[in-house]
Amino acid sequence: MPLIEARNLVKIFSSDGGLIGGHPRTTRAVDDVSLTIEAGETLGLVGESGSGKSTLGRLILRLIEPTSGSVTFAGKDVTAMKSRELRGLRRDMQIIFQDPFGSLDPRMKVLDIVTEPLIIHGERGDLKQRASELMRAVGMDASALARYPHEFSGGQRQRIGIARAIALKPKFIVCDEPVSALDVSVGGQIVNLLRQLQKEFGLTYLFISHSMPVVRYLANRIAVMSSGQIVESGDAVEITTHPTHEYTRKLLEATPEIA
């Protein structure tokens, strides 16, 4: 049984203003998408901006509600869960956001940012010690806990965001373009960190990106998304060396190889 299974997911957004005749303007951001993710693997989701990949990631986590379709986690129907049951599931399903500058509350110290999930879920014990362990896990010193987000670089902030995401020891993490806002060298360090943490904690990833080389390096399988649909999917090496869809070939041509 796959850890994650999405079936026929659809998300339609409506905007105010509408078209002639008073009908609302609609956007089909995710259009009948189905996919599976096995425990312990990384599925790379690749596409241009506006392709629907971030929306799909949020649908899987049920951070936004699908228009139709379903998501199961370890056989449990996520889309049918009530709020209390869904809150409990947050321990197992987390997200790393794209923007390391906007994803951390500037009014909170790092200690409070990292321990907030633990407090919300009723964790007991020495939370500061746990936070220190999380800092070490992401390659930072425990002295960072006493500081504010604005005192750190983008790469360091993303490490803090990763520490927050792994605090509850989740099984599954959506990595929503976690290196796109970072310099190439810093982004490479973050990708290597994610790989290391996956081995250490047995994590399963949906890694969202617009970069084929990055996804090929990290992912076991790749799904290519365009205009809300999966147009091609398969083994990461096979997809990046023998693409069958024209859109996939264009993505490969548009991204430089990593030396």
Image: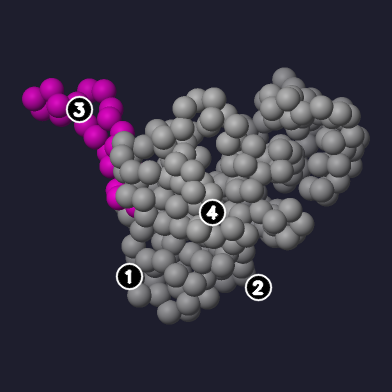
Q: Give the Cα distance between marks 3 and 4.
A: 37 Å
Does the stretch in magenta take in 19? yes
Residue in the foreground of this view, choosing between 52 and 73: 73
Q: Residues within 10 Å of mark 2 (few under 14, many from 20)?
A: few
| Above-or-below relation of 245 to 10 | below
Which amino acid is tagged 4? Answer: Leu
Which amino acid is tagged 1? Answer: Glu
Q: Residue 259 carries which label?
A: 2
Label 3 sits on a secondary structure element that is loop
Q: Which contiguous range is marked in magenta?
A: 12-33
Q: How crowded is mark 1: few (under 14 residues within 10 Å), some or many (20 or more)?
A: few
* Residue hosting label 1: 246
Which amino acid is tagged 2? Answer: Ala
Q: Which residue is drawn at 53% across and 49% down?
A: 74
Q: Position of residue 241 (x, y in %)?
A: 48, 78
Q: Give the Cα distance between marks 3 and 2.
A: 48 Å
Looking at this view, name the residue that lies furthest to the bottom. 242
Quadrant for residue 34, please give it: bottom left
Residue in the foreground of this view, choosing between 73 and 209: 73
Q: Which mark is residue 3?
A: 4
Label 2 sits on a secondary structure element that is loop
Q: Which numbered mark, 3 or 2, is in the foreground of this view?
A: 3
N-term mark: 4 or 2: 4
Residue in the foreground of this view, choosing between 14 and 154: 14
Q: Where is residue 117 in the image (x, y as percent from the top left)?
A: 70, 30
Label 4 sits on a secondary structure element that is loop
| Above-or-below relation of 184 to 164 | below
Q: Residue at x 39, y 47 (%)?
A: 52
Q: Which residue is drawn at 45% across and 52% down?
A: 5
| Above-or-below relation of 233 to 159 | below
Q: Give the Cα distance between marks 2 and 1.
A: 25 Å
